[in-house]
Amino acid sequence: ETGVTQTPRHLVMGMTNKKSLKCEQHLGHNAMYWYKQSAKKPLELMFVYSLEERVENNSVPSRFSPECPNSSHLFLHLHTLQPEDSALYLCASSRQSKNPVIQYFGAGTRLSVL
Amino acid sequence: GQQLNQSPQSMFIQEGEDVSMNCTSSSIFNTWLWYKQEPGEGPVLLIALYKAGELTSNGRLTAQFGITRKDSFLNISASIPSDVGIYFCAGLWGGGADGLTFGKGTHLIIQP
């Protein structure tokens, strides 16, 4: 248990569906991240929230929409996805500080788009 | 953007053997991290390196931050079956809430 909980663990959706991924951290951190992990590719950073404000958006398609209502919760809203969006979506959190920060990951949501 | 080259891509070893893997980058990092990921789980931090030249151990694991700040290696001594998994290096340029740059991973398989 890393202190970062993601739900659901598995999700199957059609291309016309709308769904949301949820991440919750119990570590008292103030920065949260979404990463995408596809087969045979490095983990790709999607979004960064620091102090509940989005600070980075790595050219992610608009069909992915993040939301960070408070420092403990992060959502990824999905709509009209494509089959190539099937992947493991990982949430991470860290404590923003001047010192190099360590990110702690959740177990991920395995997403399949049909 | 920044890229990390991690090698080898996979390793097939016998239980009890030592393992060595490394990451190289075309640009410098201020922090190197090594994670392990097992099936159905997210990456779990093994070792964090903060200074060029730093050598850090965690049990049977030893990692070093290259002196040029462009590379790092991870060694595992006397491998055991539970060492099976995918090992990722990750580099961090800044501090604060910067995203990590990951290598593609080294898949470690231990043959009985």
Image (cartoon, coloured by chain):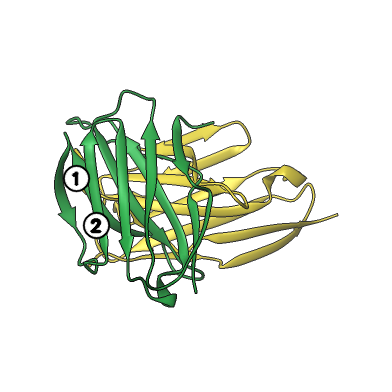
Chain colours: A green, B yellow
- Label 2 amino acid? Ser
Q: Residue at x 36, y 71 (%)?
A: A81
Q: Is residue B50 visible?
A: no
Q: Is residue A11 left or right of residue B111?
A: left
For the residue labelled by badge 1, is the local secondary structure a helix, a strand or a loop?
Answer: loop
Q: Measuring 56% from the left and 60% from the top, which residue is drawn there?
A: B106
Callout 1 and callout 2 share a chain: no
Can you identify the residue that label 2 sits on?
A65
- Which disc is residue B94 wearing? 1
**Percent coordinates x, y for residue A4 in the rendering:** 43, 35
The residue lying furthest to the top in this view is A28
Q: Is residue B65 left or right of residue B97?
A: right
Image position of B40 with respect to A25: above or below: below
Where residue B96 sits: x, y (%)? 19, 38
B15 relative position to A31: left or right: right
| Mark seen at residue B45 | none
Mark pair 1, 2: CA separation: 25 Å
Mark 2 secondary-structure assignment: strand
Q: Residues within 10 Å of mark 2 (few under 14, many from 20)?
A: some
Quarter assignment of residue A43? bottom left
- Chain letter, disc 1 residue: B
Amino acid type of the residue that numbered disc 1 sits on in the rendered structure:
Gly
The residue nearer to you, when weighing B39 against A77, is: A77
Q: Nearer the viewer, mark 1 or mark 2?
A: 2
Mark 1 Cα shell of 10 Å, populated few (<14), some (14-19), many (≥20)? some
On the rendered structure, is A3 left or right of A63?
Answer: right
